[in-house]
Image: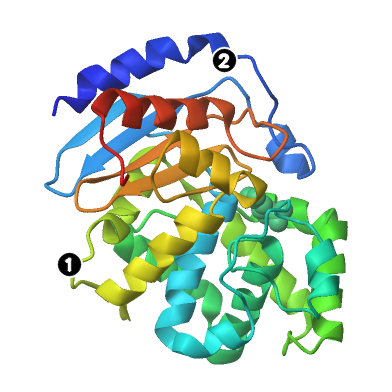
Amino acid sequence: MNYQIILEEIYRDIQPFAKEGKQADYIPALARVNPDQFGMCLQTIEGEQFILQQADTRFSIQSISKVLSLALCLSIEGKKLWERVGKEPSGAAFNSLIQLELENGIPRNPFINAGNIVVADVLLSRLKNPEKKFIEFIRALCDDETIDYNLEVANSEREKSYLNAAIINLLKYHNNIENEIEEVLALYFKMCSVEMSCKQLAKAFLAFADHTRKFDYAGVYLTSSRVKRINSLMQTCGFYDEAGEFSFLVGLPGKSGVGGGIVAIHPKLYSVAVWSPRLNPKGNSIMGMKALELLTTKTEESIF
Ligand code: GLN
């Protein structure tokens, strides 16, 4: 398949959407990002790479990090995690409080904020230095030592963290947080602040596109059963209250972040990352969603 020709067609076709939406502004450091940027990278499991535009520009991966922290957490905690976090789509915004109250502090899934804050709590309880371990895991996935946190973004989110503070207080009230609230939030915001380019993200997510890889990622093993389960959660919960829409339009497991990034995988074929900061009201990149919809339409390849 000549993905390069298809990517170039996609880039042309999405131009009418270039000025729609705006970047996340509830995190002050993200409000300062130039919204008119776009990058894309498709990486096949055979090692070919196809890119568009700013595929090397690093951006804040935000909630895409939730897939990576879940993978790390499952490798340490195993099935026990599911006593504290559910596996059902939420059908609600990523930072919603409503279900958490109704469901007694058990978050619907690990890809909404509440669920990932519990994941951060588990990492804090089980690891000596979770920040170090998390970044080492990502560096090993990408084989790239330069990947790092952006402390300015993490601190900026922490200063305005009213909603996430409410979420963690509710979790703590229901005995679903073991550590100090401030410590857990600091780790959660740091994990969200990791900066990666489309090239680096596509490379990292090859581990999820190929179940059969038996690599040791800094002491973390992604077994094929674990990869299968993480991918199924991406399919059903990767886009909050737009998970059904993404599945309908694109037909691949994926995960978005409010930095404007989206990653998706086609099992046994490729991983793909796309980035453009302008978001729709649900917090997902407009150009990114459109580009991925066109990718599976033009290639006539999806998991369905
Ligand atoms: N750090 C962001 C938050 O907690 C992540 C949200 C997202 O990317 N959807 O609000």
Locate residue 102: give its quadrant. Answer: bottom right
Name the residue that disc number 2 marks: 18
Task: Residue 84 in the image: state x and y as whole percent.
Answer: 64, 84
Up-down: is 27 above or below 164?
Answer: above
Q: Position of residue 31 (x, y in %)?
A: 73, 34
The residue sitting at 43% across, 71% down in the picture is 71
Q: Classify the position of the N terminus by image quarter.
A: top left
The residue most toward the front is 304
> Identity of the amino acid at label 1?
Thr
Q: Decide which of tag 2 and tag 1 comes sooner along the chain.
A: 2
Residue in view at x 39 percent, y 40 percent: 273
> What is the spatial separation of the Cα atoms under label 2 and label 1, in whole angstroms?
38 Å
Badge count: 2
| Residue 105 as seen in the image, left or right of residue 197 | right
What element does badge 1 sit on? loop
Using the rendered view, name the quadrant where residue 117 is placed. bottom right
Q: Residues within 10 Å of mark 2 (few under 14, many from 20)?
A: some
Badge 1, how many Cα within 10 Å: few under 14, some, many 20+?
some
**On residue 95, which mark appears?**
none
Determine whether the beta carbon of the residue marked 2 sits less than 8 angstroms from the nearest atom of ligand 1: no
**Viewer-side residue, 22 vs 102:** 102
Inspect this view and state whether residue 159 appears.
yes
Dot 2: what SS? loop
**Looking at the picture, does residue 103 appear above or below residue 212?**
below
- Label ID, residue 212: 1
Image quadrant for the C terminus?
A: top left
Task: Name the image colouring.
Answer: rainbow
Q: Amino acid at mark 2?
A: Ala
